[in-house]
């Protein structure tokens, strides 16, 4: 038994204890900031919990990687993932800090710890790749479970660490389940209301941004909505807000049918801020607009767009109803209980607006 070696290891443990006081951006379910040590603990627990699904991997190595991966933060602390782009030297700093932390250890152990950290940081071994994914999943799990500040950035979760979690079916499935919780949080912070006069400039900018890179857009959507508003033909104009910031908009206006059928409306444009797309916001606007139309006693609604998206809300192409110059499968209809009409559909002249 080498007393000096034992003393050196105790010194290392005393230094590593600082990790208990290193705080992360995540919060616990009681609302206090989470420590890095707590994150590492549950990361170990995750590895044990899913060990039976990680066939072929060395559980002891997994656990070692879980424990070591953030130990270097004991000196200079944690940098939240959302801010790491501003710290390009984070990896080098953390490695230097780890070398400083392990300076009291005997060479064999210090080299093993550093090799484990290098393996994790560079995702070299299958075990390191697994811990990389589990690390992201634990972070997301805590973000969703924590009692967070009102301005917590839940949308960031939806893209964080996907290149690691998408690399394995188990992690991808877990990610899908956790993302469902993330989306639920996002939707709880989003409210819908009618547009107000003070919103008009923001709505115009939003629509322009939403369609800026759309391949099949005429880029006239902001002008169309403005023209409908001037003509007092915006039957429904709803905005989606996240903490009072407008992130989405939907417009609905009357259409006329050659058969004379009354009570029909055209849905669109529907716009979501580019950085908030694919988060279910457009779907919420759709559902709210359709509900509003039914409250108004509408007979039904037509829409021009992606059948895959609008089909989820009950829209279907109807051979008896046409919009001249448009592919039949892209022009879809939804009746609110009554019979489907026949004939040609004509949108308001505002849809010809180009400025």
Image: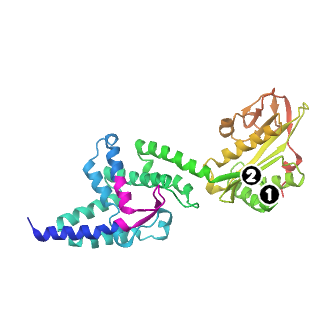
**Are the two marked residues, 2 and 1, in contact with CB atoms closer than 8 angstroms?**
yes
Task: State which region is magenta.
Answer: 20-43
Q: In the image, residue 264 lies at what x, y percent?
A: 84, 37
For residue 299, which quarter of the picture? top right
Instruction: Determine which residue is flagged by label 2.
Output: 193
The structure residue drawn at horizontal position 66% and vertical position 44%, both measured from the top left corner, is 283
The structure residue drawn at horizontal position 17% and vertical position 64%, both measured from the top left corner, is 108
Instruction: Determine which residue is flagged by label 1.
Output: 196
The structure residue drawn at horizontal position 69% and vertical position 39%, both measured from the top left corner, is 310
Please state if 180 lies on the left or on the right of 43 as rendered: right
Label 1 crowd bin: few (<14), some (14–19), many (20+), radius 10 Å: few
For residue 297, which quarter of the picture? top right
Please state if 84 lies on the left or on the right of 18 as rendered: right
Q: In the image, residue 347 lies at what x, y percent?
A: 85, 42
Label 2 crowd bin: few (<14), some (14–19), many (20+), radius 10 Å: few
The structure residue drawn at horizontal position 47% and vertical position 57%, both measured from the top left corner, is 30
Q: Which circle marks residue 37 in the picture?
A: none
Give the quarter of the figure containing the N terminus.
Answer: bottom left
């Amino acid at each position: 038994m080498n007393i000096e070696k034992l003393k050196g290891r105790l010194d290392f443990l005393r230094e590593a204890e600082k990790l208990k006081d290193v705080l992360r951006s995540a919060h616990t379910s009681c609302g206090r900031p989470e420590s890095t040590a707590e994150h590492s603990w549950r990361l170990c627990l995750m590895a044990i919990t899913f060990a039976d699904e990680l066939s072929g991997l060395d559980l002891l190595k997994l656990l070692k990687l879980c424990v070591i991966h953030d130990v270097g933060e004991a000196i200079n602390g944690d940098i939240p993932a959302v801010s790491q782009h501003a710290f390009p030297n984070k990896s080098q700093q953390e490695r230097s800090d780890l070398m400083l932390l392990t300076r009291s250890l005997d060479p064999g152990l210090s080299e093993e710890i550093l090799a484990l950290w290098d393996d994790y940081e560079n995702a070299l071994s299958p075990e390191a790749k697994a811990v990389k994914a589990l690390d992201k999943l634990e972070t997301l799990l805590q973000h969703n479970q924590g009692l967070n500040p009102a301005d917590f950035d839940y949308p960031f979760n939806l893209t964080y660490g996907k290149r690691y979690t998408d690399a394995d079916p188990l992690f991808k499935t877990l990610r899908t389940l956790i993302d469902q919780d993330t989306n639920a949080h996002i939707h709880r912070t989003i409210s819908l209301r009618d547009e107000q006069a003070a919103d008009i400039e923001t709505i115009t900018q939003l629509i322009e941004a939403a369609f800026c890179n759309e391949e099949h857009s005429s880029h006239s959507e902001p002008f169309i909505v403005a023209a409908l508003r001037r003509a007092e033909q915006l039957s429904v104009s709803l905005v989606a807000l996240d903490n009072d910031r407008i992130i989405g908009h939907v417009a609905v206006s009357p259409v006329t049918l050659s058969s004379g059928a009354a009570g029909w409306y055209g849905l669109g444009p529907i716009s979501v801020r580019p950085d908030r797309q694919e988060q279910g916001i457009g779907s919420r606007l759709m559902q709210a607009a359709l509900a509003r139309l039914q409250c108004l006693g509408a007979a039904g609604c037509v829409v021009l767009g992606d059948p895959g998206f609008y089909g989820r809300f009950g829209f279907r192409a109807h051979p008896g109803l046409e919009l001249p110059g448009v592919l039949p499968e892209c022009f879809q209809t939804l009746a609110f209980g009554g019979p489907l009409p026949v004939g040609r559909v004509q949108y308001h002249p505002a849809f010809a607006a180009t400025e």
